[in-house]
Image (tube, helix red, strand yellow):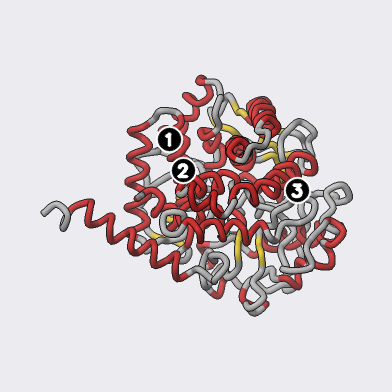
Amino acid sequence: DPAQHGPGRHHRSLRAAAVRVLLGNWTGNATVPSRSLYPHQWSWDSAFIAIGLRHLSPRRAQRELESLLSAQWADGRVPHIVFNPAVPCGAYFPSPDFWRSSTAGRPAGAPSTPETSGIVQPPVHALAAWLVHRADPAESGRRRFLARLHPGLDAWHRYLTAHRDLGGRGLAAIVHPWEPGLDNSPAWDTALRRVPPAPAGSFRRADLDHSAASDRPTDLDYARYVRLAADYRDAGYDDARARFAFAVEDPGFNALLIASEYALADIAEAIGADPAPARARAVRRTAALTDRLWDEERGIFTARDLHDDRLIPVRGVAGLLPLMVPGLPRRITDALLRTAAGDHFRLGEVHMVPSYDLTGPEFDPSRYWRGPSWFNTAWLIHRGLLACGAVAEADRLREGILRDAGATGFAEYVDPHNGAGRGIRDFSWTAGLALDLLC
Ligand code: 2M8
């Protein structure tokens, strides 16, 4: 009986396991990325989780995004962490007493409650909201989901456009390595060297209570992350006043903003608002992305360091994410497809898509964003491949994502060479995005 054996049965048990992870990590209002390592709500995690939850409960998927946006600041920024007051301070570092959003962030429009961080993460939320709506338009309509979310999403994109164009050329800059979500990518190494580390012993890492040190950023990385965040906080999280020691235009962050602008235009259209502003921003930013970040020689998008206005010669998975951007010249998408399949990423040969150049001097198959393959970037590239018409490659990647998710118990990331799970297990976006690909 084919229903008892083969891929059908395998997919059914994978689906049940993914649902168990998502239910287990639900806190009543939102989903934690992990009960142990990340016990609060994270911004882009919630977007990916909502994309999975929509197949389980569209209502819950809506709440995931609504709860995140309820912590939005008056200036439009969506904070990268929303803290759960019931979780003890020592459970995660940096905790609310470090960020002090409700006091230090007040002038920039931080809410008095809940406590949040003061930096941001990639703006995947409008895309997630649109996909959540599409999963059950009737339920979405009944709750006026899109109409309620639209002003916040629009303010979020406007914040990035008005306050974060630090280079003045139409792209959003990141001001902390936590902002692109690819924390310790080798792409940030040279820019970070200019940042004086916070004194050793001035903070305590909680992450090492839950994860192997060899899978995580180093102490020196953390000392610099702490310095950058403390400086931003001490400038009141005011983008006009802060003196950013680290400011970079990242292709992944901007590609996701473009994809989300198109989703925001779809949302506007669905609720009878004007889609033109979001669409115009998307078109302008796409031109800026190719002008500023296309690296012809390497055949990939690379990040630009605003300190010296030069491209950073590092091939990372973020440079492939523009595969998702509609309207790029075919010459560029063809080059991206060649780069993905070539020696640096070996799409179709290794497990999913490595976070960093397999041949690069800093490649490390275990250490976080310095080589391991991650499920969210693989899911985004899967979408990009489909958008470019690379259907066979997309199908193979989808199968790889599902296989790795199941074989590792929904690991946070995997070794690209042998698929061994790294980081923690029962990781929410791994489960959510696997569930999405199963449906
Ligand atoms: C990781 O980042 C956090 C800081 O934001 C950490 O290391 O503590 C990254 O993988 C990031 O992309 C992710 O959103 C977060 C929670 O899963 O963990």
- Residue 109, picture quadrant: bottom right
Report the quarter where the N terminus lies.
bottom left
Residue 364: x and y in percent read 49, 52
Instruction: Tell me the SS state at disc 1.
Output: loop
Using residue 142 as the reference point, say whether residue 417 is left or right of it.
left
Inspect the image, locate mark 2, and give the three-letter code of the amino acid beneath it: Leu
- Mark 2 and mark 1 lie on one chain; the one further toward the N terminus is 1
The Cα atoms of the two marked residues, 3 and 2, are separated by 26 Å
- Tag 2 and tag 1, C-beta contact below 8 Å: yes
Disc sitting over residue 343 in the figure: 1
User: Which residue does the numbered mark 3 point to in the structure image?
Assistant: 246
Disc sitting over residue 358 in the figure: 2
Q: Which residue appears farthest toward the left when viewing the image?
A: 1
The Cα atoms of the two marked residues, 3 and 1, are separated by 30 Å
At horizontal 40% and vertical 61% (from top left) the residue drawn is: 410
At horizontal 55% and vertical 56% (from top left) the residue drawn is: 62
Q: Nearer the viewer, mark 3 or mark 2?
A: 3
Rendering quadrant holding ligand 1: bottom right
- Residue 255, picture quadrant: top right
Nearest to the observer: residue 247 or residue 47: 47
- Mark 3 and mark 2 lie on one chain; the one further toward the N terminus is 3
Inspect the image, locate mark 3, and give the three-letter code of the amino acid beneath it: Phe
Inspect the image, locate mark 1, and give the three-letter code of the amino acid beneath it: Asp
Nearest to the observer: residue 142 or residue 212: 142
The Cα atoms of the two marked residues, 2 and 1, are separated by 7 Å
